[in-house]
Image: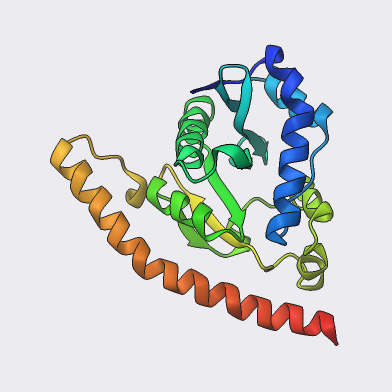
Amino acid sequence: MEIVIANNSHRVYAETICETILQAAQVRGTGIAKRKPAYIISKMEQGNAVIALDGETFVGFCYIEAWSHGKFVANSGLIVHPDYRGKGIAKQIKKKIFEHSRTKFPNAKVFSITTGLAVMKLNSELGYKPVTFSELTEDQSFWNGCQTCKNFDVLKRTKQKMCLCTGMLYDPNSNDSTQKTNKNQVEQTSENLNLDYRVKEQVFKRLKSIKQALFLKKDKK
């Protein structure tokens, strides 16, 4: 298997990617914004996506979105085909797209909104920090992209201040995001992140359950 920067030659996988994203949303029962093949192809043509392939078989995908004139970027649409899940491939794709984002947009803040605990863990390991939605992009075109999410009514109801998703941000100008080059420091940092995440995971789970109880309870009334 290889993970590469996607280009126009990979457009043949666009339909499969969209179908895999849709199926994942239905299985999880959580909000995942739908995307059309034409949109996925545009990301490939711009060099703003990575794709994982096993020979010619589709394995996984993720793409970059830029907002607020490149001040913010998001790694979106992370998906792994069901036949290849549980093998750590999502983590490899996430790392690849994050590194690609930092190369193409070195001064941009990288952010994520997600309901998935696994994605939160990956983000934490890369240096993301939980933040309020007010610290994310104000570009309305980004938030308009949430309209296809099943939880969009929650976002609209709260005037885009919160939703079932948790906002996370990597700020390249923050001291917390400074990369250490010493091998021992890197290994120690990795251990600390893992320990730190075990604590944060409980907080994330609690926060998610509170949001679900608060917002979904209102929906049932």
- Percent x, y for residue 52? 56, 27
Between residues 12 and 83, which one lies in front from this camera angle?
A: 83
At 81% from the left and 67% from the top, the residue drawn is: 156
Q: Residue drawn 79% across and 45% down?
A: 34
The relative height of residue 9 versus residue 37 in the rendered view (above or below) is above
Give how far across and how far down residue 19 sits, in percent: 78, 38
Task: Give whichever of 67, 88 is nearer the camera.
Answer: 88
Quick one: quadrant of the C terminus?
Answer: bottom right
Q: Which residue lies furthest to the bottom in this view?
A: 221
Please provide percent x and percent y for residue 23.
Answer: 75, 47
Q: How many labels does the image show?
A: 0
Extreme residue toward the front, this view: 83
Q: Position of residue 113 (x, y in %)?
A: 61, 55
Instruction: Please report the residue visible at 47 percent of the width from the left and 26 percent of the height from the top.
Output: 103
- Which residue shows up at 76% across the image and 55% down it? 26
Asked if 210 appears above or below 89 in the picture, the reply is below
Q: How is the image coloured?
A: rainbow
| Vertical placement of residue 16 versus 74, above or below | above
Q: Does the image show residue 195?
A: yes
Q: Which residue lies furthest to the top in this view?
A: 9
Left or right: residue 26 compared with residue 196:
right
Residue closer to the observer: 179 or 81: 81
Q: Is residue 139 visible?
A: no
Q: In which quarter of the image is residue 153?
A: bottom right
